[in-house]
Image (cartoon, rainbow, N blue to C red):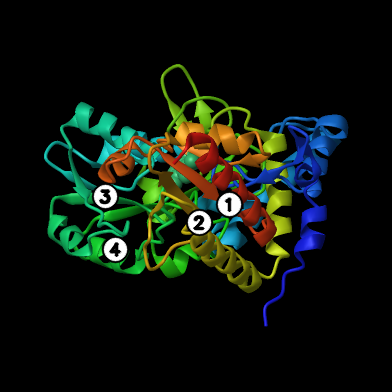
């Protein structure tokens, strides 16, 4: 039987023990950004207080220490997602930058007028707008896979949208708005069968599911440190080496070159070709500490606990007067999005906030899918392994207060 000692885990997260508006904080916004365990805070403090130095180009002791820790973090990412090679792990400043990198390099170099990119209706804005920008510049055609009333992809429509013109399929692993877990193997296999590459947005998946990029066989997989217990300002682009090697560099500058003259420059090998300038050194090292932390958890137990919380939350929220859950896919994780008849989600967010319960309300950076469900916005509670059933009870009590105050 998988086992997770939640009370011990909760001791590792200082923010779980703070008070807001004179109430204990109930943090149900980890899909937005997760809390950080003490070892991450300590790792970042250590760099900033005692080990500040630049990486890769220094010749002194502290520069070597910082370089080693930075490159160790890359190794931890490689192992975490089971990449085949270290050079397939590129540090970026987040999921958003990783997708823009692919759009600006792979997209501009390898996708042209009349070619097609397939997206889904449930993508985050960061997996829509960079492709629209590319489409406008290059005359690329965007095709969108629709979503059914439960929040699942219409796979029949997906297969029909694929053609020999499809050059890239961009799909989220887990939807931030609905919690839907998408059937990646089917999507990736079918895309490869027509010769298209696949980019998976893993921002909402890596905190909840064990990811193996080689087993998935995706071409790109992107995610952010800050949703996985690490610092903000750090993300990862995983790409298959043979694809990354053929892509032109993203930004020009220090660290990404081999030789520079005024006549011409040559570029560094992977992964440095895509990491121009001084990166977020402390952030990357802090992310390495976050990966040590999550790696030490029993992942089977994490999935079991989170599924339990999701089932409990689904059942309890259904009892709140006027509440409608949005996102009822058969395979989902970590997200409880909802509306309450007659109450704007922003009001829901503000009223529960006053009771110490932090949730998200708004379009969740996914306007197309919110529009699809015919609502102006959503309220969203998002779960992490450090949450408890008692916290879901606090959310439900707070929502009953919303119902009372707003006279639903
Ligand atoms: N994709 C998904 C599915 C997300 O949930 C998010 C963050 N809300 C992003 C992309 C963007 O991540 P970031 O802001 O860290 O770049």
The residue beneath circle 4 is 187
Q: Pointers 4 and 2 in contact (CB under 8 A)?
A: no
Using the numbered discs, state the Cα–Cα distance from disc 3 to disc 4 in whole angstroms: 11 Å
Give whichever of discs 2 and 3 has the lower sequence position: 3
Task: Indicate the quadrant where residue 61 lies.
Answer: top right
Q: Pointers 4 and 1 in contact (CB under 8 A)?
A: no
User: SS at mark 2?
Assistant: helix
Residue 254 locus on image (x, y percent): 57, 26
Quarter of the rendering occupied by the C terminus: top left
The residue beneath circle 2 is 317
User: SS at mark 4?
Assistant: helix
Disc 4 C-beta below 8 A from ligand 1: no
Residue 250 locus on image (x, y percent): 43, 32
In this rendering, the count of numbered labels is: 4
Residue 189 locus on image (x, y percent): 28, 67
The residue at the point 27 percent across, 42 percent down is 374
Neighbourhood count class around disc 1 (C-alpha, 10 Å): few under 14, some 14–19, many 20 upward: many
**Closer-to-camera residue (319/97):** 319
Using the numbered discs, state the Cα–Cα distance from disc 1 to disc 2 in whole angstroms: 6 Å
The residue beneath circle 3 is 168
Using the numbered discs, state the Cα–Cα distance from disc 4 to disc 2 in whole angstroms: 32 Å
Task: Indicate the quadrant where residue 162 lies.
Answer: bottom left
Give whichever of discs 3 and 4 has the lower sequence position: 3
Give whichever of discs 1 and 2 has the lower sequence position: 2
Which residue extends farthest bottom?
1
Q: Say whether residue 65 is left or right of residue 360.
A: right
Disc 2 C-beta below 8 A from ligand 1: no
Q: Pointers 1 and 2 in contact (CB under 8 A)?
A: yes
User: SS at mark 3?
Assistant: strand
Using the numbered discs, state the Cα–Cα distance from disc 2 to disc 3 in whole angstroms: 38 Å
The residue beneath circle 1 is 396
């Amino acid at each position: 039987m998988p086992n997770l000692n939640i009370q011990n885990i909760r001791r590792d997260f200082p923010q779980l023990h703070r008070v807001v508006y004179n109430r204990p904080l109930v943090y149900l916004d980890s899909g937005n950004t997760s809390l950080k365990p003490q070892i991450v805070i300590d790792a970042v403090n250590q760099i900033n207080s005692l080990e500040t130095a630049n990486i890769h180009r220094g010749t002194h002791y502290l520069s070597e220490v910082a370089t080693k820790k930075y490159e160790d973090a890359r190794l931890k990412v490689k192992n975490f997602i089971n990449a085949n090679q270290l050079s397939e792990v590129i540090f970026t400043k987040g999921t958003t930058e990783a997708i823009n990198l692919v759009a600006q390099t792979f997209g501009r170099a390898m996708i042209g007028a009349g070619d097609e990119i397939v997206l889904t209706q449930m993508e985050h804005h960061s997996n829509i707008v960079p492709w629209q920008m590319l489409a406008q510049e290059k005359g690329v055609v965007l095709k969108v896979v629709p979503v059914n009333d439960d929040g699942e992809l219409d796979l029949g429509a997906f297969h029909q949208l694929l053609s020999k013109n499809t050059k890239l399929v961009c799909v989220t692993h887990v939807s931030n708005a609905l919690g839907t877990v998408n059937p990646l193997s089917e999507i990736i296999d079918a895309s490869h069968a027509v010769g298209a590459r696949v980019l998976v947005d893993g921002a909402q998946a890596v905190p909840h599911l064990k990811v193996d990029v080689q087993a998935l066989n995706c071409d790109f997989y992107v995610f952010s440190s800050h949703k996985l217990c690490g610092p903000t300002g750090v993300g990862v682009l995983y790409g298959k080496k043979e694809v990354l090697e053929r892509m032109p560099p993203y930004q020009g500058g220090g660290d990404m070159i081999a030789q520079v003259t005024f006549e011409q420059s040559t570029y560094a090998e992977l992964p440095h070709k895509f990491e121009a300038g001084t990166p977020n050194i402390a952030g990357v090292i802090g992310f390495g500490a976050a990966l040590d932390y999550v790696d030490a958890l029993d992942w089977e137990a994490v999935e079991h606990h989170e599924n339990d919380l999701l089932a409990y939350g689904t059942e309890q929220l259904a009892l709140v007067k006027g509440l409608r859950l949005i996102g009822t896919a058969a395979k989902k994780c970590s997200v409880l999005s909802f509306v309450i008849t007659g109450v704007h989600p922003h009001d829901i967010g503000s009223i529960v906030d006053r009771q110490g319960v932090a949730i998200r309300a708004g379009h969740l950076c996914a306007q197309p899918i919110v529009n699809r469900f015919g609502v102006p916005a959503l309220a969203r509670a998002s779960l992490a392994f450090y949450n408890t059933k008692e916290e879901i009870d606090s959310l439900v009590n707070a929502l009953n207060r919303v119902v009372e105050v707003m006279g639903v």
